[in-house]
Amino acid sequence: MDARATVLLLPDGLSASGAADRLAALVPVVTQSTHAIERTFWDTFDGRLHRAGLALADAASRLVLMDAATSVEQASGDQPRGARRLTLEILPAGILHDRLAPIVEMRALTPIARVRSRQLPINVLDDVGKIVVRLRAEEPAALAGGAAEHPLRPRLHVVGVRGYDADYDRVLAILTGAVGLQAAPRPVLDDAVAALGRPIGGMSSKLRIELDPAGRADAAAVAILRRLTEVIEDNTPGTLADVDSEFLHDLRVAVRRSRALQRELRGVFSPEPLRVFRAGFRELQVLTGPTRDLDVQLLEFGELAAGLGESTAGDVAPLRRLLEQRLVIERRKMVSGLRSERTRGLLANWADFLDGLVDAPQGDRPDATRPIADVAAERISAVYRRMVKMGRAIDDDSPHEALHDLRKKGKELRYLLEFFASLYPPDVVKPMVSTLKGLQDVLGRFQDREVQADLLRALGDEIAAMEGGAAALMAMGVLVERLVEQQEQARAQFAASFAQFAAKPQRKIVRETFG
């Protein structure tokens, strides 16, 4: 059982030494020397450690993973020297790596705050002079660069000693009663992040938009599309800097969602400017596609190679080198395109267009002023019915394109349900999303395995010309066979997944909810 711990705020005007003096009048204590520490805290862009209730800090060339609320250490390890971002690939093997792996996954950890603290250790003693509770008074300040500091509320860490729970309870009662301390409402890291003007918990790519069912459809579209534009802009710097692959993934999802809304709610837009913007967003999707495909191939490379067995897994090393070389080339093209005047102009003009949409003439915008609940219901119902029709037409002889087209249509339905989730009961939307997700997973594996297999086949000539190419080609042949097998397995699962999605009870729910 871990030692118990809590953190209390010191009242304004009470210093660490003052807290020690006040406590010394109530219980036997031994005060140690004050010392200063400076820590850099790390997290992913989307705050995955924060969501897990953890904090990662470095100090004295060590990384320490701790409970964010109590600062109790959970794991530690050596810090890679000079790293400006931390990934699982560069973290040493050990407990820290294993604790972080399922949380951060493919994301990089980057510095989010620096905190300098004056700390005063205080030990509470029993009648025979044994330490029964450990206290640590802390006076923290967030560092904003240079010598600038933002003082934060001082606090008192209270940590129990195993076997002395009664003493812990007694001291905590004195601190919250006689001394008048209150529990800290949030960790020092959150205070530091807020003081530096950054979002607590990282940046989210979720929509989280509440819509008025009776509100105008064009106003609802603007609200959603503005949020999606924010997501694109938030993820562009990390994409350009190649911090981790999820920046590009989230950017592309936001672009896809924008395109879906442009298409499905086209009646709220004037046709000509919409045509121009749809073409621009399509170009943006195409621009970022090859880099994302190679990202996925490399992210899954280890799992694919592991399936070859120890004797041949190393034979695919030339393939990995070639994929990495291709990624460098495609990334360079993508970065140039994202930084181009064309892309910057597209996003700036799009933002201006959204700002003026609600006040624009309505003559060629038949759905502009209709209630969004009505327009959304029509589109959700229509796309669902279209998917059912498309899926029923697929049999064992249908071309691959039929499944690919159904997957794309499924994405549109998924996005519509996400856009307008606030308009409908959760007990309707969530089950529908669940069955749709099951179908999309099957269709996604089907298409992804085909894309991966086609890419490997296309690289054959280049691999053959490389050192070790002959062995690599043989290993690649095995990989392609396995990818084809997995694609066939996904196709075999399609009928059952589609049947659940298109089942009579589901069709009834769609009809009753969306018309």
Image (spheres, rainbow, N blue to C red):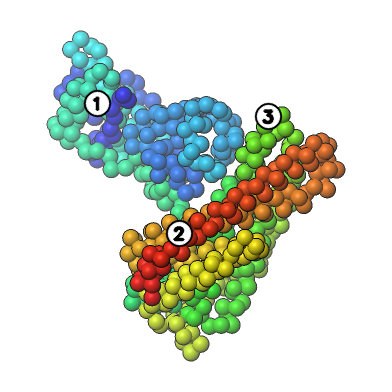
Q: Nearer the viewer, mark 3 or mark 1?
A: 3
Q: Is residue 95 visible?
A: yes
Circle 1 crowding by C-alpha within 10 Å: few under 14, some 14–19, many from 20: many
Alpha carbon of mark 3 to alpha carbon of mark 1: how far?
61 Å
The extreme top residue here reads 128
The residue to which callout 2 is attached is 500
Q: Is residue 287 left or right of residue 214?
A: right
Of residues 378 and 243, the one drawn nearer to the viewer in this rendering: 378
Q: What amino acid type should be assigned to the residue bearing mark 3? A: Glu
Image location of residue 489, percent across then percent down:
60, 49
Q: Is residue 132 left or right of residue 386?
A: left
Circle 2 crowding by C-alpha within 10 Å: few under 14, some 14–19, many from 20: some
Q: Earlier in the sequence, mark 3 or mark 1?
A: 1
The residue positioned 37% from the left and 37% from the top of the image is 68
The residue to which callout 1 is attached is 20
The residue positioned 46% from the left and 64% from the top of the image is 502
Q: Earlier in the sequence, mark 2 or mark 3?
A: 3
